[in-house]
Amino acid sequence: MQFSSTAIVSHPPTIVLDTMIERMEAIVPFLPNIDSITTSSKTRLPDGRLRIVRRWQGSLNQVPLLLRPFASPEWLAWIDTALWTPAQYKVDWTHSPALESLEAFYDCSGTNFFEPHPDEPDKMTRMRITGALEVYPQRLPGVPQLLGQRLAPQIESFLIGLVTPNLTALAHGLQRYLDTQPHAATNHRTRGRR
């Protein structure tokens, strides 16, 4: 299943990008379906790109009722392996289940952009998420194959909303977080005068 979405954050792309790369954990209180984000590693590559591996923990209260009997906190955790290219305002990412027994359950990857908004490039960021998700319900441990196939559309929708957090929620969370940061507000006003 292919997916894409676009949203706007009223802060400069350099600040948004820096927040996503350096302070992603700080946004968690502003994300309704995420309990935690933990950075496992960050590697600066010679060509200016950064490889960052983070563990995301989704919230159990976001699981649809039909799936709750099968869900556990471990099922709702995933590893985000991201290759950031700051000069292009983009990140290529791959998500994989944190639980080894779920490794074959789905494939999810894509490219996100945190680029200058065409109308106000120094003041606003246009966020674009693009990706693809393929779910293999017959590989879900503990779920009968027939039931897994019947639940596949709901599982795909749920994973798209959880594993690749709703762009509107992420944009809203970034907006709220950055609005609380005095340095971001100062930089935003200063850049707006140029």
Image: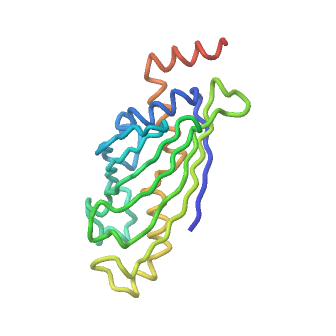
- From the viewer's perspective, is residue 23 above or below residue 58? above
* Residue 118 picture quarter: top right
Q: Residue at x 62, y 29 (%)?
A: 124
Which of 136 and 81 lies nearest the eye of the viewer? 81
Q: Which residue lies furthest to the right in this view?
A: 119
Check the image and tell me how it is coloured: rainbow
> Picture quarter containing residue 107?
bottom left
Where does the image place residue 173, in percent across and percent down from the top left?
Answer: 46, 37
Q: In which quarter of the image is the N terminus?
A: bottom right
Q: In this view, does 88 lie to the left or right of 108?
A: right
**Residue farthest to the bottom, as pictured:** 146
Q: Position of residue 152 (x, y in %)?
A: 46, 76
Q: In this view, does 84 lie above or below 153?
A: above
**Eyeballing the image, is 8 above or below 166?**
above
Seen at 61% across and 16% down, the residue is: 191
**Which corner quadrant holds the C terminus?**
top right
The percent position of residue 26, horizontal first and vertical second, equals: 36, 33
- Residue 181 position, x and y percent, is 43, 21
The correct choice, above or below, for 150 with respect to 76 in the image is below
Q: Nearer the viewer, residue 86 or 16?
A: 86
Task: Locate residue 165 relative to residue 129 in the image: left or right.
Answer: left
Q: How many labels does the image show?
A: 0
